[in-house]
Amino acid sequence: MLITLDGTPLLGPRTGIGRYVENLVAGLPAALARHQPGARLQVTTWTARGGRLSGLPTGVRQVGPRTPARLLRECWRNTQFPPIELLVGQTDVFHGTNFVSPPTRNAREVVTVHDLTYALHAETVSAASLMYRELVPRSLDRGAHVVTPTEVVAAAVRAHYGLEHGRVTAVPLGVDDAWFDAPPADGAWLRAHGLPDDYIVFVGSLDPRKNLPRLLEAHAVLRAADPNTADLVLAGPAGREQSLQGRAGVHLTGWLDDSDLRGLVAASRALVLPSTDEGFGLPVLEALATGRPVVVSDLPVFHEVAGPHAVTASPTDPESLASALDTALRADDDGQARASRQEWARQFTWERCADRTVEVYAA
């Protein structure tokens, strides 16, 4: 069996989807050896600017020509051309890792649908993401099997598209081992980056569904009630947004590498992710792996990912979010509490993610 996987999310800075694809590609060769001996993996990318990938596992090769993603998607919106075999040669399975699965001649299609934001909250997404409203149904009409990161999203996809239960498989994401052993950033590092010693951390983008304006409002409410409230540190893409500079009690990290981000989260009082919609919420799981409390929106997906360790709030009510932040800042944080959070996070492994993905390929 030959599997071809869309590695385009590996180009450029790693988003949550990029980290999913990175860890999936890293784990698939061993998973295939365990469950499908003799099966092979290759990756392709859709870009006109080279798109050569480095660091691929031994035996995994990159295939396919330089082809603009925008042009391909426009073709696939309206036609069944070009089939993937014309781009990469014969393959038994094609895995579209980021909502888009191309037409095929004979290959089985698998497509990962990370969330339904493009369909249910269209006003919050880019024009490129709006194309999923046409591209995903075309894949489904051809019989593509859907992979989702949570059971919540799986149920939503089945309901939205009227799919039988067996057409959709939830494959939870994992958390890197490095998060469990991450040393907290020390005072010298924090001072060198212009950050306080006492802070809550947000890791995310400026995507409207991340709900950052309401978080800033909630933090201001908390500071008004108690000027000694922990500051708010913004990391990820939001931590590089200069338009957010100058807000009282709010700090930006600038760009951070993975090691520094882990240290930043590990040294925080809590992580907050008040999204209005989410497919998984990987920063929540990573924070739990460091033993930190988490504050999240009261969404079913966060109950699935964080279980009993989530302090929840209404994503539309700043007062509710401020109260949840206060609760997290007062939460038990002894060794037992930290160990309990880490034990929950250990359920989610990239090895399991790869194994379950191989089961989908072989079904």
Image (cartoon, rainbow, N blue to C red):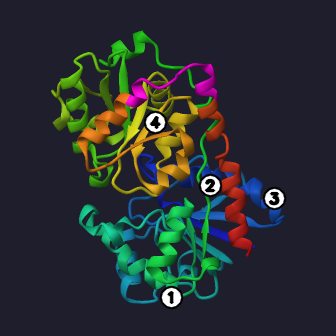
> What's the mark number on residue 248?
none
| Label 3 close to label 4 by CB (< 8 Å) | no
> What's the mark number on residue 141?
1
Q: Position of residue 12 (x, y in %)?
A: 42, 49
Q: Earlier in the sequence, mark 1 or mark 4?
A: 1
Q: Position of residue 49 (x, y in %)?
A: 39, 59
Q: Earlier in the sequence, mark 3 or mark 1?
A: 3
> What's the mark number on residue 33?
3
Asked if the magenta segment contains residue 331, the reply would be: yes
Q: Is residue 4 left or right of residue 137?
A: right
Front: mark 3 or 4 = 4
Asked if the magenta segment contains residue 50, the reply would be: no
- Residue density around tag 1, few if under 14, some if 14–19, many if 20 or more, within 10 Å: few
Image quadrant occupied by the N terminus: bottom right
User: Residue flagged by tag 2: what amino acid is it?
Assistant: Leu
Q: Which residue is mark 4?
A: 294
Front: mark 1 or 4 = 4
Q: Earlier in the sequence, mark 2 or mark 3?
A: 2
Q: Residue 177's quadrant in the figure?
A: top right
Q: Residue 24's quadrant in the figure?
A: bottom right
Give the Cα separation between the discs numbered 3 and 1: 32 Å
Q: Earlier in the sequence, mark 2 or mark 4?
A: 2
User: Residue flagged by tag 3: what amino acid is it?
Assistant: Ala
Secondary structure beneath dot 1 equals: helix
Give the Cα separation between the discs numbered 2 and 4: 26 Å
Give the Cα separation between the discs numbered 1 and 4: 39 Å
- Residue density around tag 3, few if under 14, some if 14–19, many if 20 or more, within 10 Å: few
| Label 2 close to label 3 by CB (< 8 Å) | no
Magenta stretch, residue numbers: 327-339
When the figure is inspected, residue 168 is found, relative to residue 210, above or below; the finding is below
